[in-house]
Image (cartoon, rainbow, N blue to C red):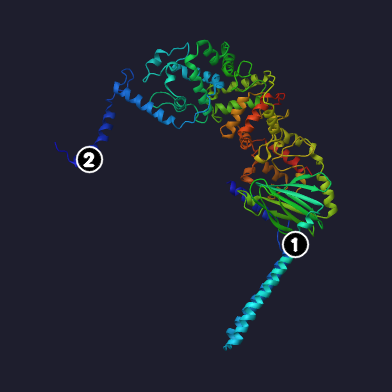
Amino acid sequence: MHISWKKLAIALAILPFVVVLAAWIGFFNVGASSGHWKITEWFLHFAMRSAVRTYALAVDVPEALPRHAIQPAAGHFARGCAICHGAPGEPRSPVVMRMLPQPPDLAGTVGEWSDAELFRIVKHGVRFTGMPAWPTQERDDEVWAMVAFLRELPSMDEAIYRDLAYGERLAPPAGAAGALRQALADCARCHGADGLGRGPAIPVLAGQSEAYLLESLRAYAEGARASGLMTMPATEAKPQFWPDLAKHFAALPTMHPGVGGDPALVRRGREIAEKGVKDAGVPACLGCHGRHDRSPLYPSIAGQPERYIEAQLGLFRAGKRGGTRFGHLMANAAKGLTDDDVRALAAYFSLSAAPSATGTR
Amino acid sequence: MGQHFSLSAASLLLASGYPGARSVLEPAGEEAQQIAVLFWVMLSGGAVIWLGVVGLLLHSALFNRRRLAEKSASSIILWGGVVFPSVTLCALLAYALWLMPGLRPFAQASSAALRIEVTGRQFWWEVVYRPSQRPPVASANEIRLPVGERVELSLKSADVIHSFWIPPLGGKMDMIPGRTNRLSLMATKPGIFRGPCTEYCGTSHALMAFSAVAMEPEAFRSWLAAQAIPAEGAGASGGALFLRHGCGSCHFVAGTDARGLIGPDLSHLGSRVTVGAGILPNTEDAVARFIARPDLIKPGSRMPAFDMLPPDDIRAIAAWLRGLQ
């Protein structure tokens, strides 16, 4: 049969209308019950795996995964991921098993992906599957912590997982006081019932200024301070409880700082903290953070974990931390810091003693 | 908006009349005096020659149109076109060269009793007085000098190229990162002068100036002695707010815990002619406005805005700073 170019062109011009008509009639079955055709399923997986592999080429993989930060990642996994992907001692529910596509049990499948590919999936999610993106695109450090946790997942037993993700669970009593207890228990999952933080990635809340804790909670809840890990608990705690939560942790006794560290590094950190770096425009840290009579909105950094301080200064330098009325002061101050300065400051402050509690305003 | 605000701040100051002379033609220092004389000599010489040339032109065009003999034409060209310009230009050059040792008196400078170190920073001036045999005195954005005494200025820059010029006194001299340029000045009349930055140095270049105050030697010495000790109001209550909000991280105020080194020294802010590096009158209101929005008054300034502080706190801090005489 001979088809002229003219007829072919007409057929192509009509085709979109035919497709729209077919969709409008509703002939195509979008139900999940019957599953995909074999070829559709193969093609979708093929396309997904290829895209993840290709986009992962552009991911900058850190030298070592942040294993020190898997505890908060485990807490987040329990809250946001385990419902679909299961967890040690928590199999996927029958409801989830009828999703299309069915979310994989990660303990068995993370081995198929490289670190960069896992990062890509966790940060950006996967279209058409129900896999969401990370709550913020600003915090690659959190995504890497999750990748580090996922790497541990296959060999993790139930007891270790439950300890990482939940800590010692406080039983919530009933009533309004119960709701506050529940919010407190949620904080304690990562920050510890003693407020000292359950690991080197978690800030010490015990003895921190109440006004600062409140402002920070507000910044996380309103999304002004980007964090996938903190946004969920901050928005779940009702605003009416925020002042009580801040007051509770502010009143807890703070920890005595450790000793040791590289003396040269600590000395350099102390010098920057006391005098700043004049020609780099770095102010003296202690002028704001070291005074007993300082504004209660200036947090205490003394005695915070070294890795935490390092991470936060990195975020300030990258312009990714703030969200309060005072955040721009630190963004300005941290701009001139070098990597070595940051390490020295983290070493110094993690070992220095916290000044006593500040007044409130 | 920011642009508009800063422009209006500057024009406000211009309109209100800056409290000081700024013209090279009203010299108040030895160096500027010589430059002014050189200018007038050059101007009058140039005027006389111009009149002579135009006169000759008119004369030959209107009154004396006959042809000259070849010989007399040649001699006019020789005397008027070669000999006269050569002699005149050589004389003027010799005069200008003769002035130079006086304008760049390096030899005398080393014997100056007072050395002032000025460092240009975006967008302000760090000033350190180094009197012989006495400890240095830090200040900012204002330079005071004794009338009738030679002062040596060491000019530096911490970031980009700035240029130092006090038109009625002398200059200008570039401030170049990594080197120290020397300038020697002697004021001959007391007065207040404006010194603008005269090398483009960034967004707020036009908002970077300082006040130069020439004082009678006795008044200068007692002023310098007063600057060397903490201001009287330094311990007062407004200072507590200054420290509470962390201002001492960047600013130094003698006699308090404020030991910051990266911003201007504020030890005697109240005694200065202007604030904000020569752009605002030294009033409580201007100081308060600067604290609240330095980014609007001086775009590109390193100081962050403090408009999130309670207005009463800002006002109390401004009043306290104004009181540091």
Looking at the picture, which amino acid does disc 2 mark? Ala
Label placed on residue A281: none
Q: Quadrant of residue A255?
A: top right
Q: Chain of mark 2?
A: A
Q: Image quadrant for the N terminus of chain A?
A: top left
Task: Give residue B205's position: percent from left, percent from top.
Answer: 63, 50
The residue carrying mark 2 is A9
Q: Quadrant of residue B70?
A: bottom right
The residue carrying mark 1 is B101
Task: Give residue A70's position: percent from left, percent from top.
Answer: 54, 20
Q: Residues within 10 Å of mark 1 (few under 14, many from 20)?
A: few
> Of A175 and A84, which appears nearest the observer?
A84
Rendered view: A175 above or below A239: above
Image check: B315 left or right of A67? right
Rendered view: A35 above or below B113: above
> Of A155 and A226, which appears nearest the observer?
A155
> Of A88 and B141, which appears nearest the observer?
A88
Looking at the picture, which amino acid does disc 1 mark? Pro
Q: Residues within 10 Å of mark 2 (few under 14, many from 20)?
A: few
Q: Residue at x 85, y 53 (%)?
A: B218
Q: Chain of mark 1?
A: B
**Circle 2 sits in a helix, a strand or a loop, which is it?**
helix
Rendered view: B47 above or below B119: below
Task: Report if residue B139 is visible in the image.
Answer: yes
Q: Looking at the image, is mark 1 or mark 2 nearer the viewer? A: 1
Q: Residue at x 70, y 70 (%)?
A: B92
Q: Image quadrant for the C terminus of chain A?
A: top right
